[in-house]
Image: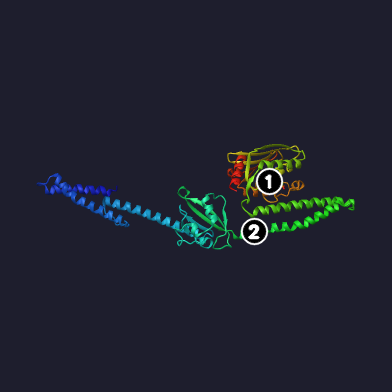
Amino acid sequence: MRWGSVYELGWITLAALAAVALTGIGLGWAEATLLVLCPLLARHAWHLIRLARLIRRQHRLVPPFPKGIWGDIYRAIGQYQQRGRKGRKRQLRFFRRFREAANSVPDALVVLDKNRRIEWANPAAQVLMNLSWPRDEGKPLLEVFTHPELADYICAGEYARPLEVAPAHNRSLMLSIRVAPFGERKKQRLIVGRDITKIFHLNLIRRDFVANASHELRTPLTVITGFLETLIDSAQTPSNHRRPLNLMQHQAERMRSIIEDLLTLSRLEMDEHAIDIAPVDVPCELEQIVADASALSGGRHRFSIDIDSDLMLLGKDSELRSAFSNLLFNAVKHTPPGSHIQLVWASTASGPIFLVEDDGPGIEPEHIPRLTERFYRVDKARSRASGGTGLGLAIVKHVLSRHDARLAVASEPGQGSTFTCHFPPGIALTASQLERRRLRAATSA
Ligand SMILES: Nc1ncnc2c1ncn2[C@@H]1O[C@H](COP(=O)(O)OP(=O)(O)O)[C@@H](O)[C@H]1O
Ligand SMILES: [Mg+2]
């Protein structure tokens, strides 16, 4: 409260006293006070009504303000209004800047409400996704940007991996679509569409080049190996030519392995998911793989095998065979004689796991994240000597990704390494489930 209000009360009291003194005759204290209070109440009522009207009409309260307590109230409300105005201006400036920034983003940005209807989109969305704001505001996204895969992708709610789509309005484009849920209970979604046409084509060219080059090299190599074999087997070959011929045959064999692995990788890269999936009798496959690994080891390693004979997978048998054998053969090839190798195929709460553990030399931590790169080898010379192509773990990674599985590598130099394939629970099958599926298929056929 300011002093003005105190003075006001003082003046009122003085006026009341003066009124009593002046009238003196006949007027009591109550009447005199009422006489003074009436104009005062009228003044308060007038200010109250005026203030209510000003606030209702959203007028700005600016000086000059009335004297006394009403002046204080007017001033306080005026300051409050000013702070509100400044806050709103700041918000508006921020919103405009944010909109300008969002409008200048080269990626398509689309905000969806909780019913997947378009709330806002930036100008890039017009070019990349053929949807324009405010023209398409309120329309369902999947009505404006029709793509069957996008509908499934948004409904699935699993947005860890982006979706690559060629939009219907411009098939020469390739978009990488990402979805980010936000807002209350993550019901709203921000769709980000990035133009990856160039990268996609470069990848396509690289993939085709590798596939074609590998394919083209296959035939001449077959001819060379054929003649080498003939020369090695021929009794007329001079004995001093035998060693270089054997070396040539060994290197030709290495080249053949690299070409085969490159072709396998190209095939795996063609599709993101494994096609022709069917129940795979993993225990049966593993039996064969273990037999091959024992032959490769030639009795130089000790094996412990722990296989759940009731656990099968829905997948592609040739791909799974290739991934499992790569991991087990690696344990044989990259560990010294006498090493212990453990293989586990088991069901866990988070899904089936395939694990290969050895107590070999292990891998330094800086190499671990790069092991699945093509041609990445910790010790190039030793890997080549053991007949490795450096493509095995790249193949494993691709096979697992096509089965929605992942590879985990744990290793301690000098202690050994553990390679674990984690499969999602959805693709596990038990022998009895497999039998039931077969019966159902037989009866429906
Ligand atoms: N069990 C293991 N112990 C130690 N090092 C390993 C093991 N498995 C793989 N590696 C390392 O990872 C590299 C990549 O493996 P991979 O892609 O299968 O190629 P490679 O053809 O050499 O086997 C190998 O060269 C080797 O250095
Ligand atoms: Mg290997």
* Circle 2 residues within 10 Å: few <14, some 14–19, many ≥20: some
Q: Residue at x 30, y 51 (%)?
A: 73
Residue 415 % position (x, y): 69, 38
Q: Can residue 183 be seen in this view?
A: yes
Q: Which amino acid does label 1 sit on?
A: Arg
As rendered, which of 421 and 182 lies closer to the eye? 421
Label 1: state its secondary structure: helix
Q: Distance between the residues labelled 2 and 1?
A: 27 Å
Q: Can residue 335 be seen in this view?
A: no
Residue 298 % position (x, y): 77, 40
The label shown at residue 321 is: 1
* Circle 1 residues within 10 Å: few <14, some 14–19, many ≥20: some
Q: In which quarter of the image is residue 163?
A: bottom right
The label shown at residue 231 is: none
Label 2: state its secondary structure: helix
Residue 67 % position (x, y): 26, 53
Q: What residue type is labelled 2?
A: Leu
Q: Does the residue labelled 2 lie within 8 Å of ligand 1?
A: no
The label shown at residue 204 is: 2
